[in-house]
């Protein structure tokens, strides 16, 4: 019995030993596999600067990320990586590789990884800009492009844009001889245009007309200010739930203000619509969206998507459009030859006894080239909106892991001497002379020039943005002569943000240009 027990014990001991050896072998193989994986995968990651433990490359970066990344591109080449906190970022700096990301592999790269502020400002990515590339987003984008921003709707809403531009010209006329902040007046004009296009006549509370633009201006400015701040949680996702800097809390508060405006306007409109037969013809965006929400056949949207889409329109439309008017005007005023050509074109196409109408815009070829050259040198989103691949991909022979943050450095590409002669000179003619040889438009099909993005995530607001910025700038240049206050000089310094703006705002003095005073009324 004892020997039997001993035998069993021995067999068990041998069995245990074999298990231990086996377990040891498994651990060894796994360790080797992990180290092999780490070695091969990390060595196949793009090159890039080494950072510090935990914080990564953060401490070495200045506030103007587009300048910093372009310096790194000169050192590490067309694609480089860097860790910011614990997150891997990959920066693409050549037209060839941008084409791979937004063309050949666009489907994999068409996702976003929204930061805390973006998520809170988009009703949890229920919008177009921050949503992952799923069926909901594709449906909503179709609604935005084909239903809301269709040619017919844009045409139907042209009087809103005309009225607001006329009001701005009148305001500037009343300030003749004094200073005008170009970004400020452009931002107001765009915001008023968008408020009118979205809400039509606005809101009547009791018997009082409520000016929605003022309320929306406060919220849009608040949202932009919060989103522009650096949020540590975005770079250390494990800390996100603590909301250390209160970014989520502050953004949620701003969004409550948006929501309050929505509740009031949607409530009032729903009451108005009750019992009314659906009207065809001129409708504001709110009406179009409410009808889609109630639609039982064809494309439809939820109430949350409706609100998120309206927020996208305000946030996407205002800052970038007004920044572009300011940059373009700065470049015109500091390049006397360009200014002369812009004025001659306006005299020929519009005439000094007339005001600029939207119908003139397609004929203003030189001004169009001025805008393109301005977009080349001062793209308002120098890295577009960051993307995040939904699977591990290979770009330029390097591994780009799933979920990493991708910056497409359009700022560097559009100034690269490899693609552009005299890249730092402001030469609108380059967009005219090459006609027929190269396609220059905002569609993103030319990988050397894609300030509105490219591929599935390209900006859907191009037709509206283009109409607004051309109309505002053409009207300002046609109606007034402009000069800097005495002793001031033009300054091209920029400041990275939601939209890249001038560091020093363009503040200039208008003088009357048109003969007939009535044209300013
Ligand atoms: C001059 C004015 C504008 C500029 C420079 C601009 C620029 C951009 C850029 C660079 C992107 C990112 C594209 C990418 O990641 O590939 C974008 C996306 C977007 N823009 Fe614009 N935009 C302008 C006007 C507008 C307007 C007027 C609207 C709305 C009516 C709008 C709505 C959007 C939306 C919803 C997205 C997200 C698209 C997506 O992720 O699928 N933008 N815009």
Image (cartoon, rainbow, N blue to C red):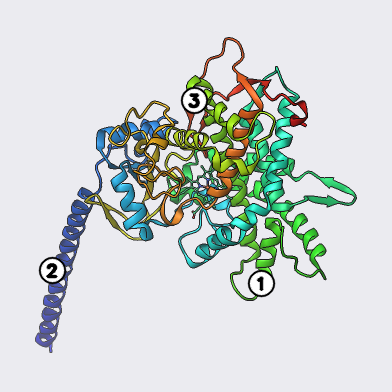
**What residue lies at 60% left-to-right and 10% top-to-bottom?**
486
Check disc 2 and report its element: helix, strand or loop. helix
Q: Is residue 177 above or below residue 430?
A: above
Answer left or right for 430 relative to 161.
left
Cα–Cα gap, marks 3 and 2: 80 Å
Q: Mark 2 or mark 3, which is nearer the start of the sequence?
A: 2
Q: How many marks?
A: 3
CA neighbours of label 3 inside 10 A, class few (<14), some (14 to 19), many (20+): many
Answer left or right for 67 relative to 300.
left
Quarter assignment of residue 91: top left
The picture places residue 94, in percent across and down from the top left corner, at 30, 42
Quarter assignment of residue 146: bottom right
Residue 61 visible in the snapshot: no
Query: Mark 2 highlights which residue?
Result: 21
Q: Mark on residue 295?
A: 1
Q: Quadrant of the C terminus?
A: top right
The picture places residue 386, in percent across and down from the top left corner, at 43, 48
**What residue lies at 19% left-to-right and 51% top-to-bottom?**
39
Outermost residue toward the top in this view? 487
Cα–Cα gap, marks 3 and 1: 50 Å
Q: Mark 1 or mark 2, which is nearer the start of the sequence?
A: 2
């Amino acid at each position: 019995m004892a020997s039997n027990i001993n035998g069993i014990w021995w067999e068990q001991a041998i069995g245990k030993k074999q298990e231990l050896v086996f377990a040891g072998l498994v651990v060894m193989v796994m360790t080797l596999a992990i180290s092999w994986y780490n070695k091969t995968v990390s060595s196949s990651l793009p090159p890039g600067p080494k950072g510090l433990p935990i914080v990564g490359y953060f401490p070495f970066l200045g506030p103007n990320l587009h300048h910093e990344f372009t310096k790194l591109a000169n050192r590490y080449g067309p694609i480089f990586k860097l860790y910011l906190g614990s997150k891997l970022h990959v920066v693409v700096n050549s037209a060839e590789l941008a084409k791979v990301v937004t063309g050949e592999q666009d489907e994999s790269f068409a996702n976003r990884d929204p930061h805390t502020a973006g998520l809170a400002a988009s009703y949890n990515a229920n919008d177009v800009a921050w949503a992952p590339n799923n069926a909901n987003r594709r449906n909503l984008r179709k609604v935005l492009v084909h239903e809301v921003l269709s040619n017919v709707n844009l045409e139907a809403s042209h009087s809103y844009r005309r009225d607001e531009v006329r009001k701005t010209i009148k305001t500037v006329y009343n300030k003749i001889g004094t200073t005008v902040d170009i970004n400020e007046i452009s931002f107001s004009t765009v915001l008023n245009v968008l408020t009118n296009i979205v809400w039509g006549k606005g809101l009547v509370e009791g018997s009082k007309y409520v000016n929605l633009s003022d309320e929306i201006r406060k919220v849009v400015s608040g949202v932009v200010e919060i989103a522009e701040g650096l949020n540590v949680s975005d770079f250390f996702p494990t800390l996100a739930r603590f909301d250390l800097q209160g970014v989520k809390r502050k953004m949620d508060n701003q969004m409550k203000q948006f929501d309050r405006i929505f509740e009031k306007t949607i409530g009032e409109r729903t009451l108005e619509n009750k019992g009314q037969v659906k009207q065809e013809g001129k409708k504001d965006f709110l009406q179009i969206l409410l009808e889609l929400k109630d639609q039982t056949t064809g494309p439809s949207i939820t109430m949350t998507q409706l609100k998120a889409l309206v927020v996208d329109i305000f946030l996407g439309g205002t800052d970038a459009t007004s920044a572009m008017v300011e940059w373009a005007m700065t470049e015109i005023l500091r390049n006397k030859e360009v200014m002369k050509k812009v004025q001659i074109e306006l005299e020929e196409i519009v005439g000094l006894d007339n005001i600029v109408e939207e119908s003139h815009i397609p004929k203003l070829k030189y001004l169009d080239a001025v805008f393109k050259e301005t977009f080349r040198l001062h793209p308002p989103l120098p890295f577009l909106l960051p993307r995040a691949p939904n699977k591990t991909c290979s770009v330029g022979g390097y591994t780009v892991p799933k979920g990493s943050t991708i910056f497409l450095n359009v700022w560097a590409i559009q100034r690269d001497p490899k693609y552009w002669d005299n890249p730092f000179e402001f030469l609108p003619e380059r967009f005219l002379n090459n006609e027929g040889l190269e396609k220059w438009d905002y569609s993103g099909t030319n990988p050397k020039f894609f300030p509105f993005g490219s591929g599935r995530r390209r900006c859907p607001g191009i037709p509206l943005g283009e109409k607004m910025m051309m109309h505002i700038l053409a009207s300002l240049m046609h109606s007034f002569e402009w000069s800097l206050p005495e002793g001031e000089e033009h300054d091209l310094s920029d400041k990275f943000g939601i939209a890249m703006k001038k560091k020093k705002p363009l503040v200039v003095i208008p003088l009357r240009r048109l003969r007939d005073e009535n044209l300013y009324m």
